[in-house]
Image (cartoon, helix red, strand yellow):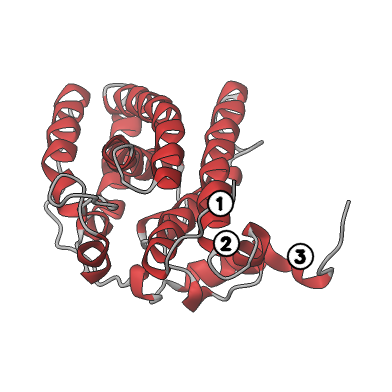
Amino acid sequence: MTATLPGPDVAAYALRLGDDALVLAQRLSWWVSRAPEMEEDIALANISLDLLGHARSLLTYAGSAEGRTEDDLAFFRDAPDFRCVHLVQLDNGDFGQTIARQIIVSLSQLGLYDALQHSSDPVLAAIAAKAVKEVEYHVDHAWQWTLRLGVGTPESARRMQQGLDVVWPYVEELFTDDELIDRLGVIGETDGGVAVRPSALRAQFEERLSRLLAEAELVRPTLPAARTGGRQGVHRESLSLLLAEMQVLARQHPGASW
């Protein structure tokens, strides 16, 4: 049976989700050998590998529309060609900041992939069905660390709260709708809907996060949203630095095999 290639809008949608996963995987991999516990080295490595698996599936599907491979998209695009949100680009900061970013991203991805399982696009639905099971673990991991840091010591609570304050201005971009979503059709709003409306995920995200913050004795930040534009290819300088490190070997030895 011949595989159906995605149309340009479906490919663009898969690309943005794949870029989110790829860049966050690269960020988390930095913690291997640097985490506060040996077991945490393994946990963050496994989460990073899960995200890399999501990225591979999504980028392979996106690239198939133009005959490009996952490696072409990962290693041979410049920063303006990426479509990831700014939150995944943020520097790791300390461990509290990394966990703050991780709980927010994981909670948003849990809602996203849970809904995307019902996409009329069979490939996206299949990717989401696998990814949501792994993201459930990502949520649990970050949830437990948020609790541990929040009610641990005054210093751990301070760092966790500071991490939330740093990442909070970039939360809004996760839930911003755009024309691509409307063109694809929204699951539950139209027959044959392909995409998930980001803004529709906000209420459940807020409910879960509020419950966690109350239990962890942390305060929900009230900082204004930052100017972003990641979905349009407008990025932070840190993304270029991350890509330079991630892509250097492939660009120096294009087409190499191991």
- The alpha-carbon separation of the residues under discs 2 and 3 comes to 20 Å
In percent of width and height, residue 144 lies at 35, 22
Frontmost residue, 53 versus 95: 53
Residue 71 lies in what quarter of the image?
Answer: bottom right
Frontmost residue, 203 versus 227: 203
Which label's residue is closer to the chain start, 2 or 1?
A: 1
Q: Which residue is mark 1?
A: 3
Residue at the (24%, 67%) spot, across then down:
183
Amino acid on which the number 2 mark rests in the picture: Ser
- The alpha-carbon separation of the residues under discs 2 and 1 comes to 10 Å
As drawn, 15 above or below 258:
below
In percent of width and height, residue 131 lies at 44, 35
Q: Which residue is mark 3?
A: 250
Q: Are marks 2 and 1 in contact (CB under 8 Å)?
A: yes
Instruction: Between label 1 and label 3, give the one nearer the viewer.
Output: 1
Amino acid on which the number 1 mark rests in the picture: Ala
Frontmost residue, 25 versus 17: 17
Instruction: Between label 2 and label 3, give the one nearer the viewer.
Output: 2
In percent of width and height, residue 220 lies at 14, 42
**How crowded is the residue under tag 1: few (<14 C-alpha within 10 Å), some, or many (20+)?**
few
Residue 77 lies in what quarter of the image?
Answer: bottom right
Q: Which residue is mark 2?
A: 64
Helix, strand or loop under label 3: helix
- The alpha-carbon separation of the residues under discs 1 and 3 comes to 28 Å
